[in-house]
Image (spheres, rainbow, N blue to C red):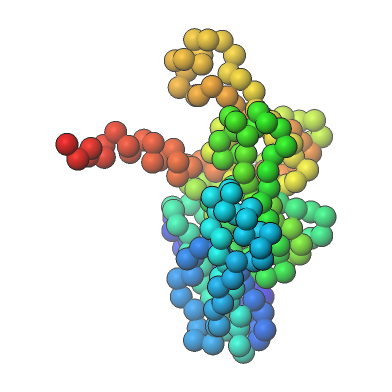
Amino acid sequence: MQYEIKGGNFPIVVCHLESGEQMITERGSMVWMTPNMKMETTTGGMGKLFSKAFSGESIFQNIYTSQGRGSITFGSSFPGKIVAVELTPGKDLIVQKSAFLASQRSVDLSIHFHKKLGVGLFGGEGFIMQRLSGSGIAFIEIDGDLVEQELLPGQQLIVDTGNLAAMESTVRMDIQKVPGLKNMLFGGEGLFHTVLTGPGKIWLQTMPIVNVAAALLPYVPSGN
């Protein structure tokens, strides 16, 4: 497969496929394709069906197979960027549920649950994420601008969970309480922060869609 990432604030990725090559996506991200692309919708198996239903993920996957040389284009759902990440066996990627756009069929998609209860209760989106494994190229969506950072062993970074788009599976994710009652009540940063500990690479996004939705909420008519 060859690919081109085009566009400005509303990017697309054009994937050029040889006969028999396949792409997979979990939502309606396809924006155009050549007529020789065959689409098949699947649940990915009973095990994945139950885990996705529990996590709130879409239970369906769309698989596109090129019958002869063809191309398929996927588009982002929010202003930002599309990033291509190459996966190899043993080098998994953990992404926010909304960050996965599409990948080669050789990439395996599964649900990633954080083992620590604290992350589950207070980590927001960080509790249930998506694990990408296997080999091949995956495309992830970034809300707003992208900042990439490589954490050294033991190096830590405190982030708002919504700003974390993806991380290598070697990065450890925990939560910590905001210190001081006044900070918790009036600081506007919530009660907890996410702590990332290296080694590994992280992908941060500057404008999470959940933050944009929260900022717009006061201006939405109530209907009264």
Q: Residue at x 51, y 63 (%)?
A: 27
| Residue 207 image position (x, y, % from top left) | 47, 42
| Residue 194 image position (x, y, % from top left) | 62, 30
Q: Is residue 8 visible?
A: no
| For residue 185, side relative to residue 91 (left or right) | left
Q: Residue furthest bottom?
A: 68
Q: Residue at x 53, y 10 (%)?
A: 181
> Quarter of the image holding residue 193?
top right
Q: Is residue 187 visible?
A: yes
Q: Residue furthest left?
A: 224
In the rendered view of the protein, which quadrant contains the N terminus?
bottom right
Numbered disc total: 0
> Quarter of the image holding residue 203?
top right
| For residue 198, side relative to residue 220 (left or right) | right
Q: Residue at x 82, y 55 (%)?
A: 90
In the rendered view of the protein, which quadrant contains the C terminus?
top left
The residue closer to the viewer here, 23 or 122, is 122
Q: Is residue 202 above or below residue 98?
A: above
| Residue 154 image position (x, y, % from top left) | 80, 30
Q: Residue at x 61, y 80 (%)?
A: 65
| Residue 52 image position (x, y, % from top left) | 60, 54
The residue closer to the viewer here, 50 or 171, is 50
Q: Is residue 83 above or below residue 17?
A: above
Q: Is residue 54 above or below residue 223?
A: below
